[in-house]
Image (cartoon, rainbow, N blue to C red):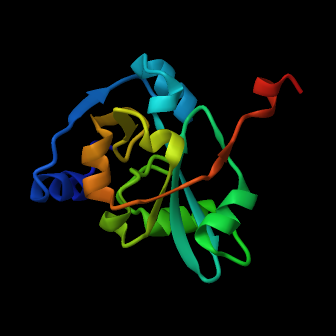
Amino acid sequence: MPFSELLRSFLDSHQAEFTLTTHPQAYTAREVAAAEKLPAREVAKTVVVFGDGTYHMVVIPASRLVDFHEVHAALGLTQARMATETELARLFPDCELGAMPPLGPLYNLPVYLDGTLASQDMIAFNAGSHREVIHMRTSEFRRLALPRIVSLVREPATARGW
């Protein structure tokens, strides 16, 4: 699936400054980072959470894992779970499964950006496919996505030597 027309229209209508690159197929955010030759801390992993009857877009660095204790606290949810593949297909019909861009306003979803990713100068994320990536200044991403900056992550267990 090529660069989403819906996404292109959104970026154009907001006069967004970005570059688009293409790489061999990559399914995980870490694989995208490797394919794009970027530090994993600059590549956004988009996780959709269903909690208290609504969907929320959580955006974290590829180098980290979602901490659901943090998600509960940061989003003020009493219960939360990851969206299912069926739900993702319905929410993002213009995207390949798991390759949705973290631009919640495009899909009428609130965006929560982890503070460690918010502090990076640049951000890269899937453009609706497993082969295309958008690169932009994090300040530009914040202008477009209107995220709430919160703490959402933990280190992978292997980084701690467990």
Task: Give x and y (percent) for residue 47.
Answer: 56, 54
Q: Measuring 62% from the left and 52% from the top, which residue is drawn there?
A: 152
Quadrant (top left, top right, bottom left, bottom right) of the C terminus? top right
Q: Is residue 68 above or below residue 50?
A: above
Q: Is residue 79 above or below residue 152?
A: below
Q: Measuring 16% from the left and 48% from the top, which residue is drawn there?
A: 16
**Which residue, as the protein is rendered here, is positioned at the far bottom?**
53
Task: Give x and y (percent) for residue 54.
Answer: 55, 79
Task: Give x and y (percent) for residue 98.
Answer: 52, 49
Q: Is residue 105 left or right of residue 83?
A: left
**Which residue, as the protein is rendered here, is positioned at the far right?**
162
Q: Measuring 28% from the left and 45% from the top, which residue is drawn there?
A: 139
Task: Give 154 or 101, whichever is nearer the viewer.
Answer: 154
Quadrant (top left, top right, bottom left, bottom right) of the N terminus? top left
Q: Is residue 44 left or right of residue 154?
A: left
Q: Measuring 75% from the left and 60% from the top, which residue is drawn there?
A: 69
Q: Can you tell which quarter of the image residue 156 is in?
A: top right
Q: Can you tell which quarter of the image residue 68 is in?
A: bottom right
